[in-house]
Image: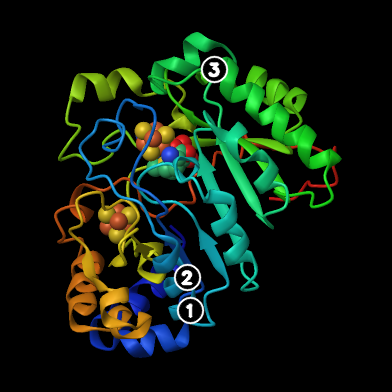
């Protein structure tokens, strides 16, 4: 870590500890994650949701509308990611449209298995960026991690969406990427996945390092974690740098029932700082006493999940492997 970021992180830690409100006035939160559902339809190897360890729930339209009304103007971006898969919500495209109509950019990650149900809605939804998990160029490598999914169905859904977008009035999502979590099963297929994604009509193929101890409370099989680790060191998630300040301090996740967690890796609800629907306010929760206690634990790395965390925010794309294609549909930026 460079000297500048060391100084900035040390300053950020001091300000957040002494006066969180001042810290956030200097840099108000500009994005938030909203969980449409904690339900998923597949069983990824080390995901607590896929392993059936997470309570199941779904966002109502009434709650979603209220949450949108409560968001402060500083929030310019909504990410439909926390636990579960957004495609498992029957109103996924409608909710994206509602968020888009507030003037914010939007993003979603999906396993893509039932994406075909939503294609007509998505091309008109205003969605800014959609990332569909394609973690292999063959069914064998793909299914190693995405247990219970179907390679042919997912990839055919990406192709259908790319075609529908090209032929639609709406032309959404503005950016359509495949996303591969790199493991020992697929690290040899990086080039093949890039070519495959291009042929499907995606705007690029992104690759990210795997979290091998995702939700350690639920998934603690060290042998299995070691077996998943890629051999190429460039594809391994680096250890947490000295003095690291987690970027999730500026974000947070709103669950389907309005509970606010400071961290999208918090499957256990340990960083629950209150319920914005019950409080009727985003600010009361975001700046409240529980939030202060929780942030102190995060900056000190004393929270039970932060102390072993390798998530550390969500910017873990592998630049040397990720490829954005020259505009094949007029949608080419990341
Ligand atoms: C927790 S998932 C939730 C959204 C959706 N269900 C999905 O899997 O795309 C959000 C992102 O984490 C990725 N992911 C899943 N398991 C992972 C792991 N072990 N390490 C890193 N990222 C992972 C997914 O591929 C997706 O890009
Ligand atoms: S990583 Fe996503 S697709 Fe896989 S089990 Fe977890 S929520 Fe489902
Ligand atoms: S360090 Fe890890 S567990 Fe702690 S807030 Fe950041 S992502 Fe969450």
In the foreground, 272 or 52:
52
Q: Quadrant of ligand 2?
A: top left
Q: Which residue is drawn at 20% across and 70% down?
A: 294
Q: For residue 151, which numbered disc appears in the image?
A: 3
In the foreground, 318 or 98:
98
Residue with the mark numbered 2: 65
Query: Which mark is nearer the camera, 2 or 3?
Result: 2
Element at label 1: helix
* Crowding near the residue tagged with mark 3, few <14, some 14–19, many ≥20 C-alpha atoms within 10 Å: many
Q: Which of marks 2 and 3 is nearer the N terminus?
A: 2
Are discs 1 and 2 less than 8 Å apart at CB? yes
Q: Which residue is drawn at 39% across and 31% down?
A: 41
Can you say whether 307 is above or below 131 in the image?
below
**Distance CA(mark 1)–CA(mark 2):** 6 Å
Query: Which mark is nearer the camera, 3 or 1?
Result: 1
Are discs 3 and 1 less than 8 Å apart at CB? no
**Distance CA(mark 3)–CA(mark 1):** 39 Å
């Amino acid at each position: 870590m460079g000297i500048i970021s060391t100084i900035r992180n040390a300053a950020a830690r001091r300000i957040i500890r002494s006066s969180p409100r001042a810290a956030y006035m200097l840099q108000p939160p500009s994005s938030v994650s909203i969980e449409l559902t904690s339900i998923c339809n597949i069983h990824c190897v080390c995901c607590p949701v896929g392993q059936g360890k997470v309570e199941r729930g779904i966002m109502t339209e009434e709650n979603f509308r209220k949450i949108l009304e409560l968001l402060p103007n500083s929030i310019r971006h909504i990410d439909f990611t926390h636990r579960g898969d957004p495609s498992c919500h029957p109103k996924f495209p409608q909710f994206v449209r509602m968020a888009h109509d507030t003037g914010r950019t939007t993003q979603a990650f999906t396993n893509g298995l039932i994406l075909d149900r939503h294609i007509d809605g998505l091309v008109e939804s205003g969605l800014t960026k959609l990332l569909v998990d394609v973690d292999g160029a063959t069914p064998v490598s793909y299914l190693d991690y995405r247990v219970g999914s179907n390679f042919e169905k997912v990839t055919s859904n990406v192709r259908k969406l790319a075609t529908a977008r090209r032929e639609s009035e709406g032309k959404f999502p503005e950016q359509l990427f495949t996303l591969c979590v790199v493991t020992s099963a697929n690290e040899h297929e990086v080039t093949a996945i890039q070519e495959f994604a291009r042929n499907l009509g995606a705007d690029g193929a992104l690759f990210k390092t795997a979290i091998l101890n995702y939700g350690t409370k639920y998934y603690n099989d060290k042998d299995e974690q070691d077996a998943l680790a890629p051999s190429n060191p460039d594809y391994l998630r680096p250890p947490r740098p000295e003095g690291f300040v987690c970027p999730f301090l500026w974000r947070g996740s709103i669950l389907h029932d309005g509970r606010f967690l400071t961290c999208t890796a918090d499957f256990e609800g340990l960083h629950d700082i209150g319920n914005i629907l019950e409080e009727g306010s985003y600010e009361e929760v975001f700046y409240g006493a529980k939030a202060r206690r929780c942030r102190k634990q995060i900056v000190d790395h004393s929270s039970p999940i932060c102390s072993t965390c390798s998530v550390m925010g969500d910017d873990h794309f592998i630049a040397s492997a990720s490829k954005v294609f020259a505009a094949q549909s007029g949608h080419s930026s990341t």
